[in-house]
Image (cartoon, rainbow, N blue to C red):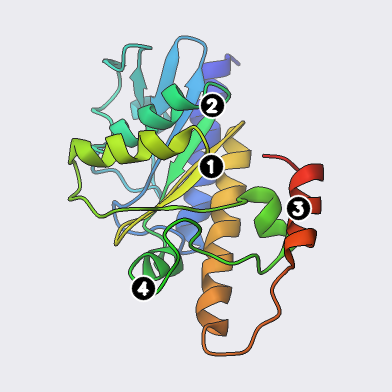
Amino acid sequence: MSQETKMRDDITRLAKSMYDRGLTFGSSGNISARIEDGWLMTPTGSTMGNLNPAKISKLGNDGNLISGDPPTKESFLHIAMYEERPQTGAVVHLHSTHSVAVSCLHDINPKNVLPPITAYYVMKIGSLPLVPYFPPGDLNLARAVREMASDHHAVLLANHGPVVAGKSLEDAVYATEELEETAKLFLMLKDVKTRFLTDEQVAALQKNFAN
């Protein structure tokens, strides 16, 4: 089995897993992965619950479509991450319910949206800046993501959802799932006095488990 065929199968499998667990719905969300001669991306208008591996979009290193169905309309978000983070192997973008809910809150810190609730959030996400709102498809959105991508492998788009890069497809998916669970915890604890990790505890985790 070639690297590309395996990656197509892995994208299909992990996309269905997220869909079946309610992390994405309808035709929302998209995944991409780096391959030797470009990228694979979920097609525009497709549902992550029923992808056809053969129809997944293949883009060359220039971003142009080589084969498969036309790519997600948000391909520019993925390419911005790849170009600013050369170590990136995959990118996941979801409209997951709790992360989107947090992205709509008025009183969050735009430099770091979620507090350090758990060690695993710090290890897999670290800090999470909020990207200002732009309409879907607006190239200013890609520009804003690009400005943050060199320092952050995960960002939260205001009133939209997360974009998460990882060294591998599994890394990107698992980090996105950790982000969604932390957003859920944050909303549950929002009006409750909560013990967050201390600055010293966060620093120790970041030293030992750098992204």
Query: Could you say where residue 176 lies in the image, as x and y percent from the top left?
Result: 54, 51
Query: Which marked residue is nearer to the observer: mark 1 or mark 4?
Result: 4
Mark closer to the chain start, 3 or 2: 2
Which quarter shows the N terminus?
top right
Q: Nearer the viewer, mark 2 or mark 4?
A: 4
Above or below for 175 versus 9? below
Q: Looking at numbered disc 3 in the image, what kind of residue is underneath it?
A: Ala
Q: Earlier in the sequence, mark 1 or mark 2?
A: 2
Q: Is residue 37 above or below residue 128?
A: above
The residue under label 3 is 203
Query: What is the spatial separation of the Cα atoms under label 2 and label 4, in whole angstroms?
Result: 36 Å
Of the image marks 4 and 3, the number of the one nearer the N terminus: 4
Depth check: 165 or 128 in front?
A: 128
Q: Which residue is mark 2?
A: 7
**Does the residue at mark 2 contact the one at mark 4 (Cβ under 8 Å)?**
no
Give the mark toward the camera: 1 or 3: 3
Residue under numbered circle 4:
105
Cα distance between the residues tagged 1 and 4: 33 Å
Going 74% across and 47% down the picture, which residue do you hit? 206
Q: Is residue 114 above or below residue 64?
A: below
